[in-house]
Image: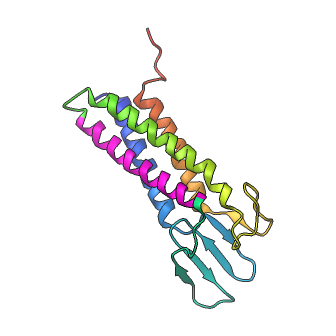
Amino acid sequence: MDKFTITSGILFALADCLAIVSLIKPDWIVSNVGGEMRLGLMQECLTIYNRPQTCIPPSSLPYEWGICLLAIFIGSVGLTTTIVLLIVSTWERSCVVHARYIGFISMILYCFAAVIFPMGFYIPQIGGEPYQLPHNVEVGISYILFVLALWITVISELFVGKVCLPHI
């Protein structure tokens, strides 16, 4: 196993962890007007005027966010499969090719989710338009972690494909 394969495996694992953490945390959309509202793909939390925080599963997840959740979940399963294939490639070198393609598909799914997510800004809790948040609402750390996971996946794909090496 060469250093590029090891590096890509570590980066794929980091991207997978970041994507999973972003799914778990309900901080995709946040607002501090009249209390604290935190919306996520798997739960939403509300704190009204210093009362205890209440977290519930989303009452009605917009279909765009449902597609986004599915794409991230399948992409994370793909990244986990890629990591396993990169480990197996220590003994069976041909597994790197399969890992490369599965990692690429995961990267495409993450890109798709990043583009689809802002289409759901029209929900009543947010009150915006697709791709346009109102001034009192902003994206939270979970979305930022997810975009970071997306970029790390792109960099990992470059390493596993050895695109950075000159072809002599």
On whether residue 4 falls in the magenta region, the answer is no
Q: Nearer the viewer, residue 123 or 46?
A: 123
**Residue sticking out furthest to the left:** 91
Q: Nearer the viewer, residue 164 or 23?
A: 23
**Residue sticking out furthest to the right:** 135
Q: Residue at x 31, y 30 (%)?
A: 96
Q: Is residue 61 above or below residue 105?
A: below
Residue 2 lies in quadrant: top left
Q: Is residue 106 above or below residue 143?
A: above
The percent position of residue 70, horizontal first and vertical second, equals: 47, 55
On whether residue 74 falls in the magenta region, the answer is yes
Q: Which residues are magenta?
A: 64-88
The percent position of residue 18, horizontal first and vertical second, equals: 47, 54
Q: Quadrant of the N terminus?
A: top left
**Residue sticking out furthest to the front:** 63
Q: Residue at x 60, y 57 (%)?
A: 64
Q: Is residue 117 above or below residue 159?
A: below
Label count reads: 0
Q: Residue at x 74, y 83 (%)?
A: 34
State left or right for residue 70 relative to residue 38.
left
**Residue sticking out furthest to the top:** 168
Q: Quadrant of the C terminus?
A: top left
The percent position of residue 114, horizontal first and vertical second, equals: 59, 49
Magenta segment main secondary structure: helix
Q: Residue at x 45, y 38 (%)?
A: 105
In the rendered view, how is the structure colored? rainbow
The percent position of residue 102, horizontal first and vertical second, equals: 39, 37
